[in-house]
Image: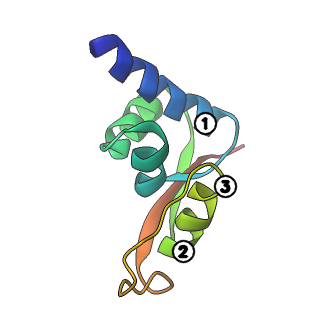
């Protein structure tokens, strides 16, 4: 099981290295990673320049739905709820 976890966290790192932004919701839905901030911290410790900003939940849902089907709860105000988005800065 440990190698699977390593493989999934490597997939998140590869996602970021490819200059694609990611939120905790996307990390969980697409890669099964629930603790994205620990991967971000690890990458920063390795010298990666990673930036972050708040984005609407709806943005993450839109990106997830490019790869999977994700339906947030109907009563969730997805345009008002904010998530932290991370990306590797150039």
Cα separation between marks 2 and 3: 13 Å
Q: Position of residue 55 (x, y in %)?
A: 53, 71
Q: Residue at x 60, y 39 (%)?
A: 16
Q: Position of residue 43 (x, y in %)?
A: 46, 31
Is mark 2 in CB contact (under 8 Å) with mark 3? no
Please give left or right for residue 90 compared with residue 38 in the image: right
Residue 39: quarter of image: top left
Q: Residues within 10 Å of mark 1 (few under 14, many from 20)?
A: some
Cα separation between marks 1 and 2: 20 Å
Q: Residues within 10 Å of mark 2 (few under 14, many from 20)?
A: some
Q: Residue at x 28, y 14 (%)?
A: 2
Q: Nearer the viewer, mark 1 or mark 2?
A: 2
Q: Considering only order in the chain, which callout, 3 or 1, is on the residue closer to the N terminus?
A: 1
Q: Which residue is mark 2?
A: 58
Judging from the image, what secondary structure is the residue with disc 3 in? loop
Cα separation between marks 1 and 3: 14 Å
Q: Considering only order in the chain, which callout, 2 or 1, is on the residue closer to the N terminus?
A: 1
Please give left or right for residue 78 compared with residue 32 in the image: right
Q: Nearer the viewer, mark 1 or mark 3?
A: 3
Q: Nearer the viewer, mark 2 or mark 3?
A: 3
Q: Residue at x 42, y 28 (%)?
A: 9
Instruction: Give residue 50's mark.
Output: none
Residue 61: quarter of image: bottom right
Judging from the image, what secondary structure is the residue with disc 2 in? helix
Instruction: Give residue 66's mark.
Output: 3
- Colour setup of the view: rainbow
Residue lying at the far top in this picture: please name it.
3
Q: Considering only order in the chain, which callout, 3 or 2, is on the residue closer to the N terminus?
A: 2
On screen, residue 79 above or below 67 = below
Instruction: Give residue 15's mark.
Output: 1
On screen, residue 76 above or below 65 = below
Q: Position of residue 45 (x, y in %)?
A: 41, 29
């Amino acid at each position: 099981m440990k190698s699977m976890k390593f493989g999934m966290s490597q997939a998140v790192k590869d996602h970021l290295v490819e200059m694609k932004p990611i939120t905790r919701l996307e990390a969980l839905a697409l890669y099964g990673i629930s603790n994205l901030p620990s991967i971000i911290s690890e990458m920063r410790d390795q010298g990666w320049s990673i930036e972050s900003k708040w984005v609407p939940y709806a943005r993450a849902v839109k990106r997830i739905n490019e790869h999977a089907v994700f339906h947030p709860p109907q009563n969730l105000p997805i345009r008002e709820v904010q998530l932290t988005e991370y990306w590797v800065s150039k």
